[in-house]
Amino acid sequence: MLMRCILAENRKLHGAVIWLVFLVVPIISALYGTVNFLQNLGLLTFDWYNLWTQHTLFYTLFFFAPMVGVYAAYLWRLEHLGHNWNLIMAAPVRRSYVFLAKFLVVAKMTLLTQGWVFLLYLLAGKLWARLPGWPPAMIVIWLLRGVLGSLGVIAFELLLAMIIRSFAVPVLVGLAGGVSGMLAASRGFALLWPFALMQAGMNSNRKEDMLGGQFAPFVLACLIWAGVFLSLAAMLLRARDVRAE
Amino acid sequence: MRALWAEVQKAHRRHDLPVAVGIGLIVVLWASASAPGTADERATGYSALLYALPIMNAVVMPVGMAALASRIWDAETKGQTCKLLFTLQSRDSLFGAKTALGMLENLLVCALEGLALPVLGMSQGFTEVLNAGIFLWLLLCTFCVNGMLYFLAFLLSIRLANQVAALAVGFCGALLGLFAAFMPPWVSYLIPFGYYIPLSPIGMNWDADTRIAEMFLRPLCWPLLAFTVLLAAVLARLCRQAITTKEV
């Protein structure tokens, strides 16, 4: 049943306009990052790590979380239109599966986004900046850690988009989350706040590993935050009935 | 007035007030986090804050204004109420009421920022005296750029039923506006989303060798402000046209 829910969510994404956001935002970030990298070679070292920081600094701090918000809000917006809520609540599947399917599909989109970010980084580094060699393997690990760190944010944004019947609010909350995550990480609370987990995982603003030997607590924190919001969503879907439009 | 009251009632049901306050609070929260530590930093506290605020606005406001505009029009899209509304009130009055509500929300966001500035200064013990003229200029510029971005998002919301467009444009605009701040100055004039930064009355000289930043007053950029108002007026006119010619 879960597979069917996932297939249904995937079909909703066919031809969806959010693919434009998926394509454009990392391109803007890569363009700016490369130009800035090449303009500041007096301050930066000509290597893959420094290109990484320029590519992903602002993207990770301010725009990764709202992007997840766009994905989440889009998937729930379709349910908020017309009488689709009635269909969902009457569908012969567990209600929590509907939420879980959306969660897995947004996680898949986030993984694809990270793949796109990496491809642009690779192309910009090799073809534009003409950096020698290949990017360190750590970069791929940081990208995957970013996906892991985003799980709590995905669950939170989906929960928000489910409760608040507005497309704009989850995106705005994503932006506020990005700012709060930056502040939490700068005060050493990266593991205690889901939006900071995403940023710590991506390691976008320094060469040294932000997690530095704290990988297990990081994974645990990611799973706990995702688990809390998923449980809350399942509880709400079980307890609340649909409100007629 | 009756049309505006109807919009205020809709906004009340949509909880627009917390959203507008939230937009202002994101900037205030961010500004409050960069508290100066040393006596030297406190002596230039307001200058540093007035320098940083436009950058923060360039990140937050394009998305914030898109969120406000999208919510104001989305109520009609989701409820499919245009057909009914156009029989009950003139299209001009609908445009006027939604514009007035949007600008009131914009004013609230700017007022929050304006209120927060002296409060932050007092709570963090700034020793610098706040330059009232510069402070008012910053608020005026923020209001005008916000207004321009509001009308752009409003236009997209009216023209396209899918609200992803308005939010996505605001979102990409924020990214471009922020990047413009770190590019050569002429680039920032090409990206209206980031006009907060070239309109800023405070500049910064960064000495890479000593790693010391020095704030300085910049001449007020009246032509750019006039261009912003003109752009806002053109976009407002396009919004009005979009409502008056909308097929229902």
Image (tube, helix red, strand yellow):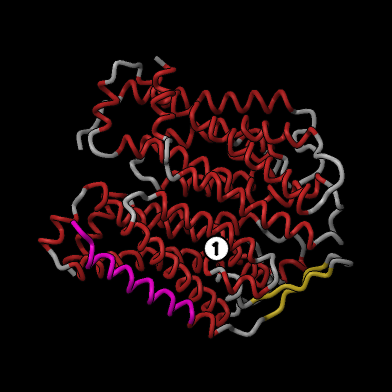
Location of residue B132 with respect to B45 vertically, above or below? below
Using the image, name the chain to which the residue with label 1 belongs: B
Q: Position of residue A83 (x, y in %)?
A: 23, 34
Report the front residue among B217 and A106. A106
As drawn, is A71 to the left or to the right of B233? right
- Characterize the local packing of mark 1: few (<14), some (14-19) or many (20 or more) Cα atoms within 10 angstroms: many
As drawn, is B146 to the left or to the right of A79? right
Residue farthest to the right, as pictured? B209
As drawn, is B246 to the left or to the right of A53? left
Q: Which residues are magenta?
A: B227-248
Looking at the rendered image, the quarter that the C terminus of chain A falls into is top left
As drawn, is B242 to the left or to the right of A232? left
Report the front residue among B235 and A134. A134
Location of residue A76 with respect to B212 vertically, above or below? above
Residue B105 visible in this rendered orientation of the protein:
yes
Q: Position of residue A85 (x, y in %)?
A: 27, 31
Q: Position of residue A103 (x, y in %)?
A: 48, 28
Q: Residue type at mark 1: give it.
A: Asn
Q: Please tell me which residue is depicted at 45% across the width and 22% down the height of the picture.
A: A231
Q: Please tell me which residue is depicted at 52% across the width and 40% down the height of the picture.
A: A68
Tag 1, which secondary structure? Answer: helix
Looking at the rendered image, the quarter that the N terminus of chain A falls into is top left
Residue B111 visible in this rendered orientation of the protein:
no
Please, what is the dominant secondary structure of the magenta stretch? helix
**Residue B239 highlighted magenta (yes or no):** yes
Q: Please tell me which residue is depicted at 75% across the width and 48% down the height of the picture.
A: A53
> Which residue is denoted by mark 1 in the rendering?
B57
